[in-house]
Image (tube, grey):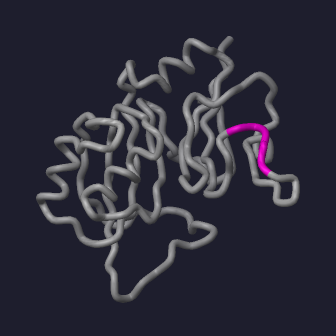
Amino acid sequence: MTRLILFNKPHGVLSQFTDKGTEASPRATLSTYIDLPGVYPAGRLDRDSEGLLILTDDGKLQVRIADPRHKQPKTYLVQIEGLPDDDALGALAKGVTLRDGPTRPAELRRIAPPDLWPRDPPVRYRKSVPDSWLEITITEGRNRQVRRMTAHVGHPTLRLVRWRIGNWSLDGIAPGTWRHG
């Protein structure tokens, strides 16, 4: 029977079970939170991103979740610097051209600040620079894609939380905890 784990990855945790960094400053890994042999992440989340990470023991399912050819929608709650105008939002929706080529169109909308857990460390607050929140859904998974997309239109990402992958979501999963999917 296939095992499927939905994990709410905290900020600062590597999306792998071991750290090949320096021994002088070990970093938190999945093994800090998950002690289940034989499950592996289906995709990745950057160390400075938070949210849904799916783990499974089924290699074919891993590919269906993570491989961009399967166009699995991934929804992110994104805090950005500044207040984007309609041109910036339109560019994100149509797709932008990054160094590694054009992105597929994205679904997005402005949202009110979501009711999320506090981030540790907190996002730097600047009184003179407003921030705003977007919900962005993409069907790719390039390295740091959402961060690069928002920076491309002049609104760097301050906080990135992956909320949903396909039909799986973070609903009811606290940071650093997991449940069976």
- Of residue 84 and residue 161, the one placed in the foreground of this image is 84
Residue 59 is situated, as x and y percent measured from the top left of the image, at: 62, 14
- The answer to whether 125 is drawn above or below residue 149 in the figure is below
Q: Residue at x 48, y 33 (%)?
A: 168
Q: Residue at x 82, y 55 (%)?
A: 26
Residue farthest to the bottom, as pictured = 127
Q: Is residue 18 magenta?
A: yes
Total marks shown come to 0
Dominant secondary structure (helix, strand or loop) of the stretch shown in magenta: loop
- The answer to whether 108 is drawn above or below residue 126 in the figure is above
Left or right of 24, for residue 121: left
Left or right of 66, for residue 149: left
For residue 79, which quarter of the picture? bottom left
- Of residue 136 and residue 87, the one placed in the foreground of this image is 87
| Quarter the C terminus occupies | top right
Q: Residue at x 63, y 41 (%)?
A: 7
Left or right of 99, for residue 62: right
Residue 15 is situated, as x and y percent measured from the top left of the image, at: 65, 41
Residue farthest to the right, as pictured = 23
- Of residue 101 and residue 117, the one placed in the foreground of this image is 101
| Quarter the N terminus occupies | top right
For residue 131, which quarter of the picture? bottom left
Which residues fall within the magenta stretch?
16-21
Q: Residue at x 45, y 34 (%)?
A: 165
Residue 18 is situated, as x and y percent measured from the top left of the image, at: 79, 39
Residue 57 is situated, as x and y percent measured from the top left of the image, at: 68, 19
- Of residue 31 and residue 97, the one placed in the foreground of this image is 97
Q: Is residue 31 magenta?
A: no
